[in-house]
Image (cartoon, grey):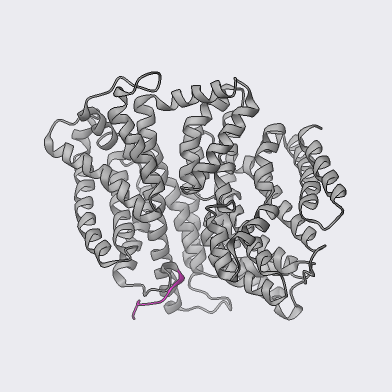
C-alpha cells in the first residue's frame, strides 16, 4: 500500500515514506521519553535537535543549493549531537569547560548550526538577535561603562553554551523536548483526523443562524482550532479555507472577511488549554503549575473572543452581515458525531490532569493514543485501515515538521538566554528600564509593551516572549507585579505582531486568501482585535481576573467589568454612529476598565 499521499501538512507535496518514517521516529522518541522515565538532559536535548535538523535543513529547502548544503549540515549536525549524547557523563564532569580542540570545533559548529537552522525555519531576525548576543558575550569586555562585562575564557564561554546543561541544552530546550513536542504531536493527531471538521460543525450549529453568523462561525471555530494548533498562520490557512469563502459568498466585504479570520486565528495562542508553546515555556520560567497558568489565561482569552464577537455586531450596523444559510448548516447528528473526534481526546486530557493528578505531558500522551484510535474512523464512523494509515502518515509528517520548527526557534532563543545569564546583561537592561521609567510601574509597562511589539514584528511570538520577559520581567516584578501577571502581560503583547503592521503574518495570509489589499485587512483587524491591545493593560488594573482558581468571584467580577468596558470601546471604534457618541463610548469604556 503506497504512502505517497498528498497532504496539507507539507503544502501539497507527496508524503515520501522517508519523511513519514522520520516523523514517526520523532513521535516515538518524544512519547518514549514520557514513559521511559528520567533521561539525562545532555542525551535527550541533543537528540531532539538531531531529529529536527532534517526537517529544517532538507525538507524545507527550496533551492538545489539549500538541499545540498542541508544534507551536509544535517550529517555533520547529527554527528555533533551524537557526540554530546554519547559522551554525556564525561562532559557533565567538565562543568562547561572545553579541554580539547575537537570539543571547541564541535561547540562552535553547534552554535553555527543552531543559528542556521533557525534562519532556514523562520528567517533572519531571531538569528541576528542571537548573533548580537553572542558577539556581546565574546567582546563585551571591551565596552566601556555599565554595559561592559569582565569577559571570560573562550573555552568556558563556548563550553557553557554547548557542552553543559545551559545555552543550547538549557531548561528552555528541555521544555521543548518534554512538553511542547508532546502537545504539538497531540495537535497534529487531532488535525489529521476529523477534529477540524468537528470544530467547524459545532461553530456552525451554535452561531451560524445569528446576524454575522459566518463571521461568528469563524470566531468560534478558530478559537477551538487554535486551542490545539497554537499558530495564527496555521489557523488562518486551515479554518480560513472554509470560513473566508463562506463570508465572501454571503456578501461580506473582502477586507472584513479576511480580518475576521486573522483576528480570530490570532487568539489561538492565548486560548487554553495549549496556548501554543508559550504556556509550557511559562511553566518553566515562572515555576507555576500548568493548571494554574490555564486558569489564569482562561478569562482574558474569553474576553478577547467576546470583544471580536462584539466587533462583528458593531460591523453589522455598517454592513448586511447575513447568517449562514440553513442548507449549509450541519445537522444535529453530524455535529454530534464529528464533535466526538475532538471531545473524546480533550475530555481524556483534562480528566487525567484535573482528576487523575497526572502531569500535562503524561495526560497528553494518553490523549494522543485516543486520538490515534479515532483515526480509524471518518465522519460517517466508517472503519478504514487504509484511511487510518493515510491519516497517521499525515499526522507523523505534520508533527515532525512542527516539532522541528518550534525546536529550532527555542534552541536559538536558548543561546540568547544563555548569554544573558553568563554576562549579566539581563540585569543591566532591567536596571535601564527601571531608570527610564523612574521606578514607576505604568511607564515600565509601556516601555515593555513597545519592546514586545517591535521584537514581535521580527520574531515568532514564543521567541519574542522569551527574550522580552527575560530582560523586562525582573523589572516589572521588582515594581510589585506578581510574576505570572508580568509573564502574561509580556506574552500578550508579543502576540500583537500577528495583526499589527508592518509585519503581520496572520493578516498577510488572510489577505492573500481573500484577494484584498493587506493594509485594508490589517486596519479592520486592528479594530476588531482591539482587545489584544487593551486586555493586557486591563489585567494590570484588575489583577483578580487571573485568579480564577483562588478567587473565582473576584475574577468573574473583574471579567464582567472589563467586558462592559471593551463593549463600549469596540462599538465606539467600529459602529457607524455620530462621532461624539463614539467618543463617549470609548471614554466610558476606558473609565469602566481602568478607573472603577
Instruction: Check if residue 192 falls in the magenta segment.
Output: no
The majority secondary structure of the magenta stretch comes to loop
Q: Residue furthest left?
A: 101
At x 79%, y 49%, the residue is: 567
Instruction: Check if residue 6 falls in the magenta segment.
Output: yes
At x 33%, y 31%, the residue is: 136
Q: In the rendered image, which quarter contains the N terminus? A: bottom left
Q: Quadrant of residue 43?
A: top left
Q: Position of residue 576 (x, y in %)?
A: 82, 58
Q: In the rendered image, which quarter contains the C terminus? A: top right
**Frontmost residue, 534 versus 563:** 534
Residue 416 in sight from this viewpoint: yes
Q: Is residue 37 above or below residue 266?
A: above
Q: Position of residue 516 (x, y in %)?
A: 61, 68
Q: Quadrant of residue 418?
A: top left
At x 67%, y 74%, the residue is: 248
Q: Which residues are magenta?
A: 1-8
**Frontmost residue, 112 versus 318:** 318
At x 81%, y 36%, the residue is: 591
- Total marks shown come to 0
Q: Is residue 51 above or below residue 544?
A: below
In the image, is 145 to the left or to the right of 540? Answer: left
In the image, is 218 to the left or to the right of 367? Answer: right
Q: Is residue 89 above or below residue 218?
A: above
Residue 94 in sight from this viewpoint: no
Q: Position of residue 168 (x, y in %)?
A: 32, 40
Amino acid at each position: 500500500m503506497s504512502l505517497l499521499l498528498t497532504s496539507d501538512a507539507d503544502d501539497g507535496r507527496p508524503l515520501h515514506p522517508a519523511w513519514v518514517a522520520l516523523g514517526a521516529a520523532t513521535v516515538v522518541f518524544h512519547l518514549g521519553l514520557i514513559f521511559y522515565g528520567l533521561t539525562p538532559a545532555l542525551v535527550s536535548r541533543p537528540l531532539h535537535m538531531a531529529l529536527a535538523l532534517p526537517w529544517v535543513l532538507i525538507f524545507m529547502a527550496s533551492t538545489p543549493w539549500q538541499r545540498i548544503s542541508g544534507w551536509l549540515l544535517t550529517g555533520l549536525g547529527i554527528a555533533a549531537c551524537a557526540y554530546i549524547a554519547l559522551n554525556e557523563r564525561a562532559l557533565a564532569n567538565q562543568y562547561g569547560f572545553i579541554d580539547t580542540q575537537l570539543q571547541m570545533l564541535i561547540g562552535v559548529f553547534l552554535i553555527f548550526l543552531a543559528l542556521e537552522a533557525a534562519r532556514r525555519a523562520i528567517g533572519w531576525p531571531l538569528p541576528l538577535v542571537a548573533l548580537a548576543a553572542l558577539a556581546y558575550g565574546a567582546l563585551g569586555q571591551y565596552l566601556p561603562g555599565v554595559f561592559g562585562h569582565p569577559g571570560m575564557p573562550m573555552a568556558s564561554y563556548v563550553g557553557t553554551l554547548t557542552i553543559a546543561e545551559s545555552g543550547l541544552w538549557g531548561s528552555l530546550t528541555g521544555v521543548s523536548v518534554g512538553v511542547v513536542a508532546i502537545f504539538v504531536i497531540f495537535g497534529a493527531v487531532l488535525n489529521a483526523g476529523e477534529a477540524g471538521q468537528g470544530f467547524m460543525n459545532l461553530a456552525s450549529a451554535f452561531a451560524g443562524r445569528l446576524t454575522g453568523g459566518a463571521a461568528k462561525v469563524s470566531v468560534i471555530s478558530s478559537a477551538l482550532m487554535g486551542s490545539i494548533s497554537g499558530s495564527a498562520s496555521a489557523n488562518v490557512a486551515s479554518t480560513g479555507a472554509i470560513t473566508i469563502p463562506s463570508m465572501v459568498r454571503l456578501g461580506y466585504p473582502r477586507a472584513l472577511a479576511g480580518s475576521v479570520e486573522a483576528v480570530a486565528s490570532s487568539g489561538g495562542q492565548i486560548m487554553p488549554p495549549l496556548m501554543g508553546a508559550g504556556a509550557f515555556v511559562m511553566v518553566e520560567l515562572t515555576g507555576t503549575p500548568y493548571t494554574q497558568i490555564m486558569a489564569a489565561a482562561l478569562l482574558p482569552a474569553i474576553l478577547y473572543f467576546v470583544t471580536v464577537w462584539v466587533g462583528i455586531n458593531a460591523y453589522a450596523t455598517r454592513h448586511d452581515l447575513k447568517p449562514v444559510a440553513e442548507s449549509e448548516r450541519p445537522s444535529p447528528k453530524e455535529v454530534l458525531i464529528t464533535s466526538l473526534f475532538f471531545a473524546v481526546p480533550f475530555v481524556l486530557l483534562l480528566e487525567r490532569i484535573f482528576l487523575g493528578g497526572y502531569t500535562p505531558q503524561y495526560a497528553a500522551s494518553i490523549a494522543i493514543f485516543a486520538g490515534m484510535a479515532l483515526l480509524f474512523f471518518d465522519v460517517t464512523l466508517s472503519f478504514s485501515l487504509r484511511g487510518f494509515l493515510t491519516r497517521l502518515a499525515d499526522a507523523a509528517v505534520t508533527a515532525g515538521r512542527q516539532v522541528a520548527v518550534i525546536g529550532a526557534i527555542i534552541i536559538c532563543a536558548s543561546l540568547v538566554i544563555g548569554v544573558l545569564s553568563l554576562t549579566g546583561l539581563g540585569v543591566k537592561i532591567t536596571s535601564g528600564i527601571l531608570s527610564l521609567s523612574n521606578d514607576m510601574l505604568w511607564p515600565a509597562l509601556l516601555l515593555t509593551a513597545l519592546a514586545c511589539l517591535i521584537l514581535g514584528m521580527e520574531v515568532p511570538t514564543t521567541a519574542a516572549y522569551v527574550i522580552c520577559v527575560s530582560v523586562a520581567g525582573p523589572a516589572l516584578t521588582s515594581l510589585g507585579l506578581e510574576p505570572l501577571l508580568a509573564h502574561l502581560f509580556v506574552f500578550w503583547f508579543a502576540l500583537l505582531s500577528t495583526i499589527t503592521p508592518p509585519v503581520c503574518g496572520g493578516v498577510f495570509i488572510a489577505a492573500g486568501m481573500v484577494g484584498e489589499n493587506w493594509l485594508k485587512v490589517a486596519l479592520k483587524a486592528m479594530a476588531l482585535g482591539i482587545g489584544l491591545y487593551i486586555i493586557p493593560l486591563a489585567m494590570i488594573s484588575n489583577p483578580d481576573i487571573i485568579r480564577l482558581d483562588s478567587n473565582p468571584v473576584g475574577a468573574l467580577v473583574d471579567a464582567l467589568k472589563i467586558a462592559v468596558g471593551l463593549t463600549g470601546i469596540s462599538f465606539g471604534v467600529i459602529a457607524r454612529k455620530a462621532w461624539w457618541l463614539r467618543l463617549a463610548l470609548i471614554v466610558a469604556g476606558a473609565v469602566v476598565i481602568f478607573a472603577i
